[in-house]
Amino acid sequence: MGWTTRFGKKRDMPGGLWLKCEACGQIVFRKEVESRMRVCPNCNFHFTIGSKQRLDITLDPGSFQEIAPDLETRDPLGFTDKIPYLEKIRQTREKVGVSEAAVAGSGRIKGVPVVVVVLEFGFLGGSMGEVVGERVARAVETAGEKRVPALLFTSSGGARMHEGVISLMQMAKTCAALERFSREGGFSISVLTHPTTGGVTASFASVTDVVLAEPGALIGFAGPRVIQQTIKQDLPKGFQRSEFLLEKGQLDGMVTREKMRDDLARLLSYAV
Ligand SMILES: [Zn+2]
């Protein structure tokens, strides 16, 4: 295409006026995508959105009160790749404008009280380390104390390798918190958004009372390439997309971003 040679790399396009949809491959007008809450006007693909925008489009204005904002990321392994892990965290905080890959808080949706956690994919791929796991667990515990439902939005590459086995431990911790919450009569919903994979899919995202997803979201444990190479078989069409998982019974429902607030308010209101 002409414009690729003219502007070099695609991301160098002036002001990022245009965007290539990763689902349908169409070049779409960025402003139009933004005005539709980052949904492709051509194929309805729901692009990944940041935690701030997710809270903005989900909660009643001004209702959000953050839970456990002061947790500090630790470096149990003394991990360094190109730069030391904690330096990477510092730079990522500056770049993304959030303190870690999950934000938690209480709020309201159409007046219905809720505790919500949103994973931030822009922060090291939404990976779950100690702070993410702790925020999920504390949010669920707060929901239990307040006797309100818990709502979890996920987008994640899985456990955070930089924190080794401490990351994997978060899978058990978050599931244990949800189990206690459920036993005490709590009601929980997770909304799996593009992409939700690895240790997050394999833990808290899949054990809530209701598991919903946005259209077209990639949801799985291992990626399709790894599975294909392991089983040496072609994978079915639409494998690991939310439509496929809904058909197979892995999801309870699919909700578009446009109807999300209405549908969540209705579901949550059954529980309060
Ligand atoms: Zn599209």
Image: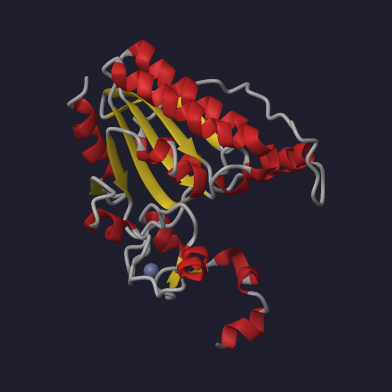
Image quarter for ligand 1: bottom left
Colouring = secondary structure
Question: Quick one: quadrant of the C terminus?
Answer: top left
Q: Is residue 22 above or below residue 145?
A: below
| Image position of 60 with respect to 101: above or below | above
Query: Which residue is located at x 68 percent, y 79 percent?
Result: 8
Vertical side of 7 occupied by 171: above or below: above
Q: Is residue 128 above or below residue 11?
A: above
Quadrant of the rendered image containing residue 75: top right
Please indicate whether residue 252 sits to the left or right of residue 222 in the image: left
Give the farthest residue toward the bottom: 2
Q: Is residue 157 left or right of residue 233?
A: right
The answer to which of 108 and 231 lies nearer the viewer is: 231
Which residue is located at x 26 percent, y 24 percent? 112
Q: Could you tell me if residue 63 is visible in this image?
A: no
Q: Residue lying furthest top in this view?
A: 145
Q: Position of residue 46 (x, y in %)?
A: 38, 57
Task: Between residue 28 and residue 204, name the one nearer to us.
Answer: 204
Q: How many marks?
A: 0
Give the quadrant of residue 261: top left
User: Where on the picture, by quarter, is residue 177?
Assistant: top left
The answer to whether any part of residue 91 appears in the image is yes
Taking the image as shown, residue 251 lies to the left or right of residue 203, namely left
User: How far from the left and from the top, in percent, is residue 59?
Assistant: 36, 32
Residue 231: image x %, image y %?
Answer: 45, 68
Q: Quadrant of the N terminus?
A: bottom right
Please provide percent x and percent y for residue 212.
29, 44
